[in-house]
Amino acid sequence: MTGRILVVDDVRANVRLLEARLLAEYFEVKTASRGEDALSAVASWPCDVVLLDVMMPGMDGFETCRRLKADPRSAHIPVVMITALDQLEDRIKGFEAGADDFLTKPINDMALVTRVRNLIALKRATDELRMRAQTGSAFGADDADDCARGAPCAKLLLVDDRASSSERITAMLGDDHNVDVESDAQQAFFRVADQSYDGVLVSLSLNDFDPLRLCSQLRDLERTRQVPIMVLAEPDDQPRVLRALELGVNDYLLRPVDRTELKLRVRSQVARKRANDRLINDVQKTIALAVTDALTGLYNRRYLETHLRTLLRQARERDAELSVLTLDIDYFKTVNDTHGHDAGDDVLREFARRIRANIRGLDLACRFGGEEFVIVMPDTDLSIANKVAERIRRLTASAPFLIGRDGAKLDVTVSVGVSSYQGETDTLDELLKRSDRALYAAKREGRNRVVSLAA
């Protein structure tokens, strides 16, 4: 995986060393020697990761990071701060400034490349969601997550089979988060799959199960793929930490774990997950708007044609039944002309409600356009489809529709045309045309009736 990396350091030797390491892995690299230059570079050269030294003259790394994270145009770019090995206070201060990760000097080559690749993958996934949602507001101040305000919001699972260790971690996080503890790694996998966790912490010191296998399983399963995973490791267990990062683990902490660093790293991961959750929700809403009729809540014509094509192919492959109902509200133009379009909308909404109440969950109900609706019924032959159509016709006519603010009563009827799948030579267009011809036959015969065409 390639990507664009901005290296910010006032020591030329450090810059050259990082540049050489990154270029060797085919990253595109740009450098800056001051915080002000870094801000200008990000504005003109969109990058995937910023490697930012803490100690610089003028604007230091902390202030540079704060400004990057305060700007909606760069807030989503991961920032990795580079600090000395023994400066825990710098890491804590960096997290408070918004840093996504840290590298300590002297920088390990594998740690550098693995961290950068991991952050690029996370950023690109987020970029894709941001693009689809067509909104930057999910990353704005108004959408700040509750954790950032210090609220006890996250549900975490700690996987650790040493009681003394799990008790210490739980004590560190318990004031701010709800922490469940699981000593059995296999049970932990099922718990994460079944419940909605905001993050998982896995000890690399499990006795009876390979913790890296658990991490791999969590990343492989669609339901748990987006859940942040952090591993807890011993200082001499760096090879497995690097392997964990290659498997897609989001972060790690070395023992003995510092309380403040643990809380800040958890907060960072939860904030990222919730931002992505909001974006995913935005995408789902956008998709729903694209395939749903806003007035009735039923699927629209675009979705019908796509989904019916799939159902027709499945019926052909399985030699199964498939039926289509086309429904048209009788004299609907008169409703609009006499009572107004608002009353017409009331009729359409109520008719859609009655349809939903009288079909199966696997049936597909759509507003085809205007006052015309289509119901697709998989695994249903013509005789059963006729019975369903007659039930909907009868229930439409049996009770008046309430319209307007005063709830005036209006009698409404519907005409229905029915067709069914005729075998492997049948097509989508022919299936819909037969149903449409049956509908017009019902209209010609006096309306408020069901007509079916077998061929």
Image (cartoon, rainbow, N blue to C red):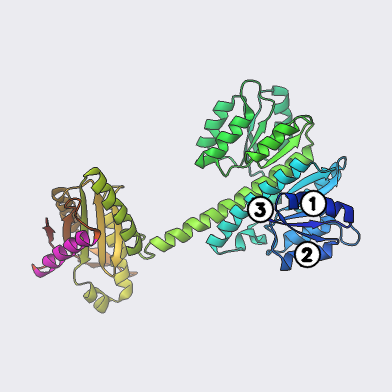
Which mark identifies residue 2?
Answer: 3
**Residue placed farthest to the front in the image?**
24
Distance between the alpha carbons at the discs numbered 3 and 2: 22 Å
Q: Are there few (<14), some (14-19), or many (20+) residues within 10 Å of tag 2?
A: some
Left or right: 388, with 310 as reference point = left
Which stretch is magenta? 429-444
Check disc 2 and give the amino acid type. Leu
**Do tag 1 and tag 3 residues touch (Cβ < 8 Å)?**
no
Which mark identifies residue 39?
Answer: 2
Distance between the alpha carbons at the discs numbered 2 and 1: 23 Å
Mark 3 vs mark 2, foreground winner is 3
Which mark identifies residue 20?
Answer: 1
Task: Decide whether residue 227 is among the magenta residues.
Answer: no
Sequence order check, earlier mark of 1 and 3 = 3
Foreground of the two, 249 or 153: 249
Left or right: 247, with 165 as reference point = left
Identify the residue at image location x=60%, y=58%: 127
For numbered disc 1, what is the local secondary structure?
helix
Image vertical order of residue 167 relative to residue 253, above or below: above
For numbered disc 2, what is the local secondary structure?
helix
